[in-house]
Image: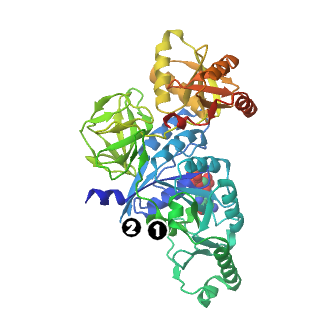
Amino acid sequence: MKYQESIEKRRTFGIIAHPDAGKTTLTEKLLLFGGAIQTAGAVKNNKIKKAATSDFMEIEKQRGISVATSVMAFEYGGKQVNILDTPGHKDFAEDTYRTLTAVDSVILVIDCANGVETQTEKLMEVCRMRNTPVIIFVNKMDRDGKDAFTLLDELEDKLDIKVRPLTWPIGMGDYFKGVYNIYDENLNLFQANKTKISKEIVSISDLNDPTIDELIGDKPAAELREDLEMIDGVYDAFDKEKYLSGEVAPVFFGSAVNNFGIQELLDTFIRISPSPRGRDTDLRMVEPSDDKFSGFVFKIHANLDPKHRDRIAFLRIVSGRFERNTFYNHVRLGKKFKFPNPTSFMAQDKSVIDEAFPGDVIGLYDTGNFKIGDTLNEGEKFTFKGIPSFSPEIFQELENLDPMKSKQLEKGIRQLTDEGVAQMFVQQPGNRKIVGTVGQLQFEVIAHRLEHEYGASCRFVPRNYHLACWITTNNDEQLKKFLNAKTGNMAKDKDDNWVFLAETPFLLTMAEQDYPDLTFHRTSEFKLD
Ligand code: G4P
């Protein structure tokens, strides 16, 4: 197959959702419809939300499972669909944010009863940062939820994006009759069925066709006609370009657990979603069609067996053809590396590959050379932008409980932060180590791994910080004043950037007012601007 065709056929995306909205179920159902698995239930839940926080076996299992199911690929409608999995547990949200740097589009799952939830908003903010095209799937229509028009308004208000329904629900809960496919003008009648794919699709060329009344009843048919008229009046016609530029999100309705509305979603996804896109670097935009290979690391996973230190670095290929056993530049280290066993992840199978193309994600065995955000390429040496750190939400000080093991602790925490398990800020002055995460669970993972993988023991002492802001300025004098005034709140991140640790949002606002020449950033993305 020609190189260009190999690129255009790929669709690399992620599924995101507030926990419990149905991400795992939808992922599984897409694999089922895509023929990658034969029966529902074959993909194990990649989440530990029901586990007690101290259940380390579950944490270990989670780590294992998420390697196995990190990328799920299948062929459908002539396209190669790559689903990049994101952790279901909210404490691993930062992992999800980073995975979003490696996708070309996303499907956002919403629970029709809960509408937009906290995690939905945060995840969408990350998508908006890079104008990632978004398709919204409103799930659980077999249950009573919010009225569809109310939901659409809520999506627009809270997610700061325009929406355009492409299917429309007929009733909901016990009265859910099916969805009308606005895009293809047909009616899909609902049958609650968790194991079989619904096939009752009736083509409708004229909305006044009495068949609709016969199939769903007079009242629902009248309502459907009224709703569709309203949709045409209120919403602009679907514009694919606006979807691709992240301005409009097409909306689908269905019930993942009942296999309902998935076919419409998948078929439309294949038709409208983007093929692999280029990425910006410190030198120039790199397009998938560039013939030299390039890619970046967005996730690092420790080996399941703690006795083996090697890790798997997940690389998203941006341009060119990646080949096994070929030397490539590791730009940050200024060294060349080759990879004898690059791995692809097809559903649950891992296999060694000889080549990979833009849009693909491959696993590289790593003995500690990679950090999240690293660029690997051939030829000209550039670095990909935009694999940021986000402000953590919980801060605790790392205390060494065994002075004889401080070297091990030092090495362990450095490697764990390279993996992106947490961020570390070193307080200045004082050199205290402040570890920041988005969830309590990470502290337990870190303590457990430091002990079992590095033989170091530690404890965490809560610190009263609320958020971390990276500082930039052209006014060194003002920065100096700020550093003097804020001892106790200042730290350096892993790349030696100044970070302000603020106890409250009010203190940050005050700092912004009092030091107008300092800019405070909520993510570290500014670094490469
Ligand atoms: P998540 O990955 O986003 O956290 O959600 P997940 O798919 O695990 O779904 C959360 C719960 O919602 C599950 O129930 C799942 O069965 C249910 N669910 C998913 N889609 C639908 C749907 O279309 N309709 C209804 N009524 N429920 C749906 P659970 O009780 O937590 O787990 P399980 O024992 O059913 O697996």
Residue projecting furthest to the left: 325
Out of 511 and 60, give the one closest to the viewer: 511
> Which residue type carries mark 1?
Asp
Q: Quadrant of ligand 1?
A: bottom right
Q: Classify mark 1: residues with Cα within 10 Å, few (<14), some (14-19) or many (20+).
A: few
Q: Kindly tell me whether residue 520 is visible in this rendering.
A: yes
> Which residue type carries mark 2?
Gly
Classify residue 275 by image quadrant.
bottom left
For the point 51% across and 76% down, which residue is it?
A: 184
Q: Classify mark 2: residues with Cα within 10 Å, few (<14), some (14-19) or many (20+).
A: few
At numbered mark 1, what does the secondary structure look like: helix, strand or loop? helix
Q: Kindly tell me whether residue 147 is visible in this rendering.
A: no
For the point 57% across and 61% down, which residue is it?
A: 249
Tag of residue 212: none
Residue projecting furthest to the bottom: 210
Residue 125 is situated, as x and y percent measured from the top left of the image, at 60, 48
Residue 477 is situated, as x and y percent measured from the top left of the image, at 63, 20
Looking at the image, do the residues carrying marks 2 and 1 touch, with CB atoms under 8 Å apart?
Answer: yes
Query: As drawn, is 6 to the left or to the right of 388?
Result: left
Q: Earlier in the sequence, mark 2 or mark 1?
A: 2
Q: Which residue is mark 1?
A: 267
Mark 1 within 8 Å of ligand 1, using the beta carbon: no
Residue 319 is situated, as x and y percent measured from the top left of the image, at 34, 48
Out of 422 and 33, give the one closest to the viewer: 422
At numbered mark 2, what does the secondary structure look like: helix, strand or loop? loop
As measured in the structure, the alpha-carbon distance from the residue carrying label 2 to the one carrying label 1 is 8 Å
Residue 417 is situated, as x and y percent measured from the top left of the image, at 50, 28
Q: How many marks?
A: 2
Out of 378 and 102, give the one closest to the viewer: 378
Tag of residue 77: 2
Out of 268 and 403, give the one closest to the viewer: 268
Q: Quadrant location of the N terminus?
A: bottom left
